[in-house]
Structures are given as structure tokens and as C-alpha cells.
Amino acid sequence: MSQLDWEIAEQPQALGRALRDGAAAIHAAAAHVRRARPSYVVLAARGTSDNACRYFQHLLGRLCGLPVALASSSLHTLYDADLRYRDALVVGVSQSGASPDVVSVLEAAGGRDGVTIAVTNDPQSPLAHCARHVIELHAGVEASVAATKTYTTSLGVLAALAAEIAGEPVLLRELHEMPGALERQLGRGGISDVAHRLADFERLAVLGRGPNYATAFEAALKLKELAGIAAEPASPADFLHGPVAIVNRGVPVLAFAISGPALGTVTEALGAVRLRGGTVVVIGDSATSPDLVVESVPEWLSPLVAVIPAQQLAAELAALHGADVDRPYGLTKVTRTR
């Protein structure tokens, strides 16, 4: 078994640790946010952490009524712009906490004097040292280059933070049931059959909306990193505004179809793909007749289970292509960019 396989399998335990051992830090950060009453939120991240922030962006708007922007760190690191973060909550998410571009945003926002939060697996990292509040992922060592358990723990602590800011104890109770749901998800099969269906494709479109817009981006990233597939993520609404034309060139579509408000637009996009004779693979709950079934959980938490078959599929496709899933070609675990 590869290191990646071990880390995928460890996700239920890692999520449980993150929610249990990080509870005090999450509560303190949320209490500060409620006192400060920020007008808006800025999120800084790269790679997998950026995808976790897409999920957080959805939750902060949906649960807390807060508008959210994703940071443009080059304005600090390359252009020396003087951005004003007055009345903002600024959150940096980085499993290593070592990316200078993410650190630069929190420093510009006032560091320990501002309403700043670092979410990281390394509480001694540069990112942690420049934030007012530090929420540790408690994921343990993640040796494989492709992040898996640090992604799901990031989703978990960000979901907890959003629910705490919103003052929703019922949502927190739902979240604390999720390690069991992840464990059940890992026991589901069907990955090998779907991987063989997609093995000969070099390009792929990935669709998701609502909370699973983030899942589409993370699935596409894993397919690129591990299997070398040129995977293009999009919301179904954006996909129908032109990119659906790639189906006519034989590009298959992987879609996250989860019961909830966003399902109708995903179904509409898949109908357009099928009318064009395209290949469709669906990851969804049992109500959507999927190719890969995800556990039925509250829709707002579905990204935590939906990403697991995507991780497994990317790893299986990498194996079919003869790739080393623990050390993808040309990639390193920590990427320091400006």
C-alpha cells in the first residue's frame, strides 16, 4: 500500500482529532470574530488549501451572511500595493504554513493586531507566528506530496469555525458525526470500474456547485497532480456558457451531483452533455443514481465525503498510468511562491 493510500484511509481519525483537539482554538477565534463584527472576509491560500477556502467562502456567505474575497497576494509580494483591510476578517490557510504569499496577506492585514486567523498543520510555521489566532489541523505527518488528510481536516475546522461564528450548535453536532461518515465512505467500492472507463482520456471536465464547487476544484487538482490528466473544474452554470463545446471533442465530464439546492443545475448541465453524446461519470448520493455513491450527510457537509472517491479515483488512474502517487513528477510537498 502506498503512503497516499494510508493517508486517505487515515482521514476519519485525522478529522476527529482536528475537531476535538482544535475545539478551543476554533471557539476562541469565532468569539473574537463575533465581537469584532467584520464587514467582509479575505481568504489567502494556494493549491489544495485554496480549494478548502472555496468551501469556506460558501459557508461564510450561507451561514454568516459575510461577503468573501479570495486574496490576490501578488499585490503584496510583487507590486507593493497598500491594501486597506479595515473591518476585515483575514484568514490564511496553508498545511505547511510556509508559503510567503499567504503569509504576506496576514502580515499586511495587521498580523497579531488584526482579526487574523491561521489554519495550518504546523503551529510553529511563519503563518502561525503572524496570526492573532492559530487553528492547528492536528493531521499528523503527511508524507505524500498530494494532500488528502490535510484537505479534509481543513474542511472540518473551517466548517466548525463557520458554524461557531453563526452560533449554530445543531450544525456543530452534525459536523461531529462526520468522522463516522468518512469511515463508511472509505468502505464503498466501484472505483476500479470507473477508473478503467476513464483511463484512456487525457482531458476531463469536472463540475460541482454550491458547497461542492470546491470539491470540483480539488478533484481536478488531484487528477492533474497524480494522474497527469488535464482536468478543468467549473460550476455547471459556467460550463453551459461555452465550455460545454469541449464535449464535442470527446472530453468526458465528471460531476458531483448531491441532493440539495444546487442539484438542478448539475442535472441540467449533464443533460446537455448527454445530448452531445458525451461520457458522464457522476459522484453523488443514492438519490441521484451515481456511478460512485457518497454517504448521505447534511448537504452543507457533503464535500467531506464527496472528495474521498475523487481522491481514490485519481490514485487509481495514476496507478493505471504507472505513476508514483507518493512522488508525482516535478512536484514537492512544500511550494514557496510569491
Image: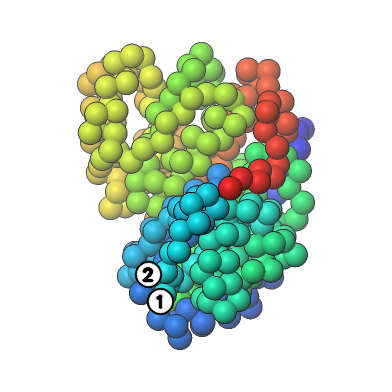
- Front-most of residues 156 and 203: 203
Q: Residue at x 73, y 31 (%)?
A: 327
How many residues crowd mark 1 within 10 Å: few (<14), some (14–19), many (20+)? some
How many residues crowd mark 2 within 10 Å: few (<14), some (14–19), many (20+)? some
> For the residues carrying marks 1 and 2, which lies nearer the camera in this image?
1
- Front-most of residues 51 and 110: 110
Residue 151 percent across, percent down from the top left: 59, 50
* Colour setup of the view: rainbow
| 32 sits left or right of 141 in the view | left
Q: Which mark is residue 16?
A: none
Please, is residue 318 above or below residue 331 in the view? above
| 109 sits left or right of 63 in the view | right
- Where's the N terminus, which quadrant? top right
Residue 252 percent across, percent down from the top left: 39, 22
Badge 2 is on which residue?
40
- Toward which corner of the image does residue 157 lie, by quadrant? bottom right
- Amino acid type for the residue under numbered disc 1: Asp
- Amino acid type for the residue under numbered disc 2: Tyr
Disc 1 secondary structure class: loop
Badge 1 vs badge 2, beta-carbon distance below 8 Å: yes
Q: CA distance from mark 1 to mark 2?
A: 7 Å
**Residue sticking out furthest to the front:** 80
Please, is residue 239 above or below residue 166 in the view? above
Residue 197 percent across, percent down from the top left: 49, 18
Q: Residue at x 65, y 62 (%)?
A: 127
Badge 1 is on which residue?
87
Answer yes or no: is residue 152 visible: no
Q: Residue at x 34, y 65 (%)?
A: 67
Mark closest to the chain's N terminus, 1 or 2: 2
Answer yes or no: is residue 146 visible: yes
- Toward which corner of the image does residue 128 lie, by quadrant? bottom right
